[in-house]
Image: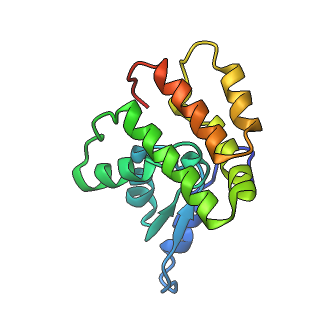
Amino acid sequence: QMYTGEADWTLIGEVKNNPRMHIPIIGNGDVTTPQRCKECFDRYGVDAVMIGRASFGRPWIFKEVKHYLETGEELPPLSFEWCMDVLRQEVTDSVNLLDERRGILHVRRHLAASPLFKGIPNFRNTRIAMLRAETKEELFRIFDEICAGQLPIHP
């Protein structure tokens, strides 16, 4: 279905429940919360779940999912500073993996879409600056400006 509509997990469940199927079945599509991930395991019996777009600008979703699957409880809110450090590491990793130009091109749209920045007043110009940033130094300067004017919030 690509990026339209909602993922239809019924076929995935049917494949998994086929008695002739002896390979791991991995489901994906619209897994955006830890609760939805658990529901997919429980309801469809899949062996694994992939998380894609929900991780854009929110790589800590994997930490949230792991905690929820292990405890049945939501992870206590992560600090804004901790999340910003994770985003900084994401930038660094992307630059180290590719090179500065391609690494920044790859990661900046994910950063600008981060739900971490929702609710920050007048964020539009900052988001545009992130989308136009061409160097790691430039992105980190924008991050520093965000942190300097931002009280801790819950992602």
Q: Quadrant of the C terminus?
A: top left
Residue at the limit of the structure toward the front, as seen here: 137
Question: Would residue 120 appear left or right of 110 to someone viewing this image?
Answer: left
Please determine whether, in this image, residue 61 is positioned above or below residue 138. below
Q: Nearer the viewer, residue 126 or 51?
A: 126
Please determine whether, in this image, residue 74 is positioned above or below residue 53. above
Q: Nearer the viewer, residue 13 or 59?
A: 59
Residue 151 visible in image: yes
Q: Position of residue 60 (x, y in %)?
A: 43, 47
Q: Nearer the viewer, residue 90 or 113?
A: 90
- Which residue is at 51% across, 78% downward? 18
Q: Could you tell me how many numbered marks the image carries? A: 0
Q: Which of the 4 image quadrants contains residue 85?
A: top left
Please determine whether, in this image, residue 133 is positioned above or below residue 144. below
Residue at the limit of the structure toward the top, as seen here: 121
- Which residue is at 47% across, 22% downward? 148
Q: Position of residue 66 (x, y in %)?
A: 34, 55
Residue 1 visible in image: no
Q: Nearer the viewer, residue 80 or 92?
A: 92
- Which residue is at 70% across, 42% downward? 109
The colour scheme of the drawn protein is rainbow
- Which residue is at 53% across, 18% downward? 119
Question: Would residue 135 appear left or right of 148 to someone viewing this image?
Answer: right
Question: Would residue 17 appear left or right of 105 to someone viewing this image?
Answer: left
Q: Position of residue 95 (x, y in %)?
A: 63, 58
Q: Quadrant of the N terminus?
A: bottom right
Q: Position of residue 31 (x, y in %)?
A: 52, 50
